[in-house]
Amino acid sequence: MADSPTEYDETFDEMEIEDDEFDRLLGIVGDGVIGAAGGLVGTAMMTGVLLVAESVGVFSRESFAALGGLAGLETLGPTLVVGYLVFLFNGMVPFPLLFASVMEYLPGERPPVSGMVFGAILWTGFVLVFYEGFSGLGLALYVVLTLLAHLAYGLGLGLVFEYLSTRPDSLV
């Protein structure tokens, strides 16, 4: 028990600081869950568009196998599966974290719009890395469909960010 009112006040202030730190930690974890959920939805939407691109011959799912090889993970299992898991991980962890940190600086008043801008920025690297020597109409389709895939990723990511971040605290 505190010997004087001053010691009691200091102990109470320390408890408030600890509660604030715990609340901040819970907020960070909650933001991480929102980011992972948004990344999962966005990556699923992107995968759908990439499957359409594959069906018209301007993308190959074997590109995912190359990701597993680049990461040095080919010994963990089938390279296509491992590569897609690397792709999914990137869509669910580092890219949503990056989006969360730059979202307020991107154009767009709502997260879905900012997410689409973010997806277009990510596309600039993807379109070069996964290019497989297409020309003519194939090149045009590759460019358009991979851009649409990234816009879908950003839209899904932004929609989930917007939806979950505006929910009551009890839901996240």
Image: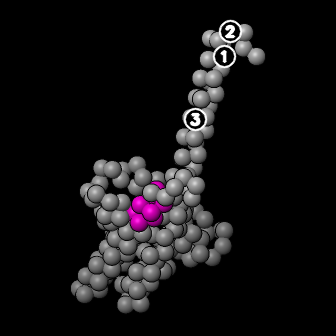
Can you say whether 102 is above or below 118 in the image?
A: above
First in sequence: mark 3 vs mark 1:
1
> Can residue 81 be seen here?
yes
Q: Is residue 23 left or right of residue 162?
A: right
At label 3, the amino acid type is Glu
**Residue drawn at point x = 54 percent, y = 46 percent:** 27
Query: Which of the 4 image quadrants contains residue 52?
Result: bottom left
Mark 2 neighbour density, 10 Å: few (under 14) some (14–19) many (20 or more): few
Where does label 3 land, which residue? 21
Mark 3 neighbour density, 10 Å: few (under 14) some (14–19) many (20 or more): few
**Residue drawn at point x = 52 percent, y = 64 percent:** 37
For this rendering, which residue is in front, 156 or 95?
156
Helix, strand or loop at label 3? It is: helix
* Dots 2, 1 in contact, CB < 8 A: yes
**Residue drawn at point x = 49 percent, y = 70 percent:** 41
First in sequence: mark 2 vs mark 3:
2
Q: Main secondary structure of the magenta part?
A: helix
Q: Residue furthest left?
A: 136
Q: Is residue 58 left or right of residue 7?
A: left
Q: Residue furthest top?
A: 4
Helix, strand or loop at label 2? It is: loop
Where does label 2 land, which residue? 4
Where does label 1 land, which residue? 8
At label 2, the amino acid type is Ser
* Dots 3, 1 in contact, CB < 8 A: no
Range of residues picked out in magenta: 158-165
